[in-house]
Image (cartoon, rainbow, N blue to C red):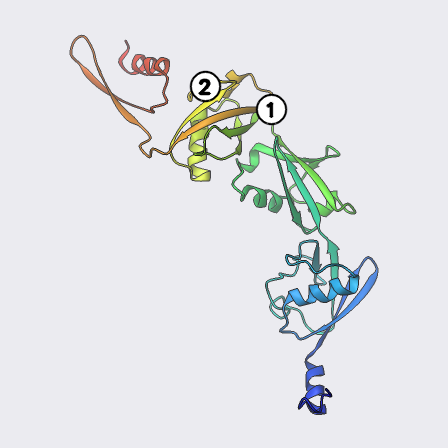
Amino acid sequence: MSLEHQGVTEQDLEIRLVKLSKFSLLYHKQYFEVYLEPEASTKELFRDLYKQMGKYVYSDYRDYSIYDEEGVVPLDVNKSLTENGLTSDATLYVVKNIQVTIFGSAQLTDIFPPLTKIPDVKKHFFAKKKYFFGADAFYFKDNKNRTLEDNFTLSSYSPKDEKMEIIIKPKEDFLLIKLIPIDTNGTLSFAILHKNETLEDLVDKIRTDLGYKGLYKFFFKGEQFSLNKPLTELNPKDFVELTYERSIDQDYKIEVFVKTLTGKITVFECLPSTLIEEFKEQIHAQMGI
């Protein structure tokens, strides 16, 4: 059916053409031209680009990123072209995203634009609630054993590769701990602590950083490890693996009444997981007996 029979006049068609904006996209020295309305979604820009490149149109648009001339922040696929600050006759740059795999006695993989800064990569993975520790306790190394500095981007270390492997390395005197739950009350997690810290410090971090409440027991090579002993007693190098049990009981501490032969009663607060030996030490420190 002709445009005339559809009720579309030449004037309507001219107005329609005026509304379209031209976007030139450069990828590997090759230009692709896309014509869209400024109010069109950025996803439409990706779809037209992928068709011209002969690629499948992916629903999550994770394989490539599109930058404007400033090349600082990639276009947000959930916004329109106008919302991304694009105007007609804009020249855009297409880059292949980098697949980053993080190794730290576990493996996590995700896709990042090449100009992503190293601190943003760290924040992204830690947001998955698998890792929890301060940025001053570790550093990243790539598979060429180079330390990834925070003031650089992924493209600084992987200018051509589409995949990148990063290893989490604790700094000197720090320890990477893999926490394996024994039951369904826990989740596989990782932490970095100073070797002079205790598992009581670890419990505080779990409750603060991950929001997991409850009572904890930790086991090293099948034996329960005291919460108030320094991690140095595990004789670690830079990695240790612990299993743990977590009770969903919200009452963290219990009261224990100790009565001496003279009739004096002293009240102690302790965790239900406290070992008898530890409790004796607590009595001796407080009562001198």
For residue 271, side relative to residue 235 (left or right): left
Where is residue 200 shown, x and y percent of the image?
42, 26
- Res 43 label: none
User: How far apart are labels 2 and 1 at the CA level?
Assistant: 18 Å
Q: Is residue 82 visible?
A: yes
What secondary structure is marked by label 1?
A: loop
Res. 271 image quadrant = top left
Residue at x 68%, y 83% (from the top left corner)? 16
Q: Mark 2 sits on what residue?
A: 225
Q: Is residue 239 above or below residue 7?
A: above
The amino acid pointed to by label 2 is Phe
Compare marks 2 and 1 and give the one earlier in the sequence.
2
Amino acid at dot 1 = Asp
In the image, residue 95 above or below residue 152: below
Return the x and y of residue 70 as percentages of the image width and height: 70, 61
Question: Splitting the image into 4 quarters, where does residue 10 fall?
Answer: bottom right
- Label 2: which secondary element: strand
